[in-house]
Amino acid sequence: MRLLLRVAAVAAAGAALYEAGALNGALELQPAPGGALVVALAVAAALALLLMALAGTGRGDATTPPTATLVAPMRLIFVLVSGMALFGLAWLRGIPYPPLNDATPYHNDAIALDECAAQTLLAGRDPYRPLDLFGCYGARRIGPDRTTPLRMGAFADVPIYPTAGELDEAWAADAAACARDASACSPADFVSRLSYPALSFLLIVPWVALGWDTNVLYVLCLVVAVALVLARAPAGSRAFLLTGVLAAASVTAFTVGGSADLLYALPLVAAWLWRERRWSALALGAAAAVKQLAWPFAVFYLLQVAAAQGWREATRRAAIAAGLFAVVNVPFVLWDAGAWLAGIVTPVAAPMFPRGTGLVILSTNGALPVLPAETYLGLEAIAAAVTVVVAWRARRTSPELGAVLAMLPLYFAWRSLFSYFFLLPLVTAAAVARMPTGELAPETARDSGALTVLALPTPGPRAGAT
């Protein structure tokens, strides 16, 4: 029965993240202190639920007998989970078309800039040098609402975040300057360079060369990642685990809504699922070579490798992952080391505005004053130290906690974007799948009150049957 509770926690966390993400989108257009509090609490509750889902070793959880007093509540919970699973599944209906409220497949600057970088490479130019932002965006018929503005130039005196009018005004002025002078086509007001490691665009080069919608590739990555989770899980729990992942609507909704994060999430899931295997370090290196968000996970991956197989093996794994990262990125370092480094450090070095769904949302929406960026950095650093200590102390009693602890410090960061959190139910499901839970029998699921939209437990024997 405990396994089913873990699945329910994953589903509830994903549903909470979905609501937080939807409300956060509205708050970006119309800030409101009350709404900000709801978002911050929803994300915090989701993180707490995911940590609860991974507490303990999970040994024998699938075979524990049901508790009679919990059967009715469990049935109600799984009715809700099954309903949310159908909702999550419905999000896949739109592929490969964009969401109804978005007429373009370029839902954010990460998708657009990655594609422009791939095209730049295909043209034989260094993708890490500043891009012609107006040429890139003009060809895709998108504008400043799909950019990351910087606290400099036209926005130097903006306290919180530029309004739509301010973005449009600065964009128009910069576009006019670009028309007069080609050297001005990479404006200082907006991020206009690739800011991720090289696999972020190398993996999509064939897709871009064929003129295909990269969002379809990202959804395919999600499908493969879920398939890997199910492949690792015991056969009896697969239907329930899949129902839980689908019910975690943030995963499907915001992938379909537009996210390139699945490029790093897929190899990361593989690395976490099979971290007892040495080859998983290659998957970890691939994830790290796609996006910096994979880097915190590497710390907890290596801690668990060290706990299970010793520090020598952990060092060997770190070298393998770093080696793959180097093989992918060194050619661009040799091409222009300064441009590559400037791109990689952009997320932390560029003067960006406070933004996110963590603690900072209370400040950007007027519920709390905006603190200095250094204060948020200090809170993030303290949280990071605490999570490492917790993971090490619980390395044997709760070895999967790192799947969530890795992202927890970002809740306190100056920029705690929703994209940092929405895939955590998927990674958590991977951690649950590798737990030694045992085989979930249909009778145990039925007697526990669990339901799934994918398979119904077989009915028990009728009274008097032989």
Image (cartoon, rainbow, N blue to C red):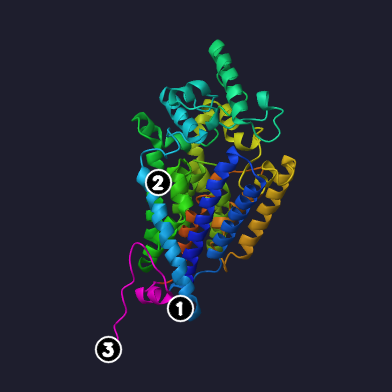
Q: Which residue is mark 1?
A: 66
Which residue does the numbered mark 2 point to in the structure image?
221
Check residue 144 in the rendering and tell me which mark sits there, or answer none: none
- The percent position of residue 347, horizontal first and vertical second, equals 60, 37
Q: Earlier in the sequence, mark 3 or mark 2?
A: 2
CA separation in Å, label 3 and label 2:
50 Å
Q: Position of residue 102 (x, y in %)?
A: 45, 36
Q: Which range is magenta?
A: 439-466
Which is in the foreground here, disc 2 or disc 1? Answer: 1
Q: Residue at x 34, y 71 (%)?
A: 457
Q: Nearer the viewer, residue 287 or 178?
A: 178
Residue 396 position, x and y percent, is 57, 67
Q: Amino acid at mark 1?
A: Pro
Which residue in the rendered view is the most extreme toward the left? Answer: 466
464 relative to 62, above or below: below
What element does badge 2 sit on? helix
On screen, residue 347 above or below 45: above
Q: Residue 252: within the magenta?
A: no
Question: Going by the image, does 444 lie left or right of 424?
Answer: left
Does 454 appear in magenta? Answer: yes
Amino acid type for the residue under numbered disc 3: Gly
Real-space Cα separation, disc 1 to disc 3, in angstroms: 24 Å
**Quadrant showing the C terminus:** bottom left
- Please name which of the two marks, 1 or 3, marks the residue nearer to the observer: 3
Q: Position of residue 338 (x, y in %)?
A: 59, 27
Identify the residue under disc 3: 464
The three-letter amino acid code for the residue at tag 2 is Cys
- Give the image quarter of residue 164: top right
Task: Tell me the SS state at disc 1.
Answer: loop
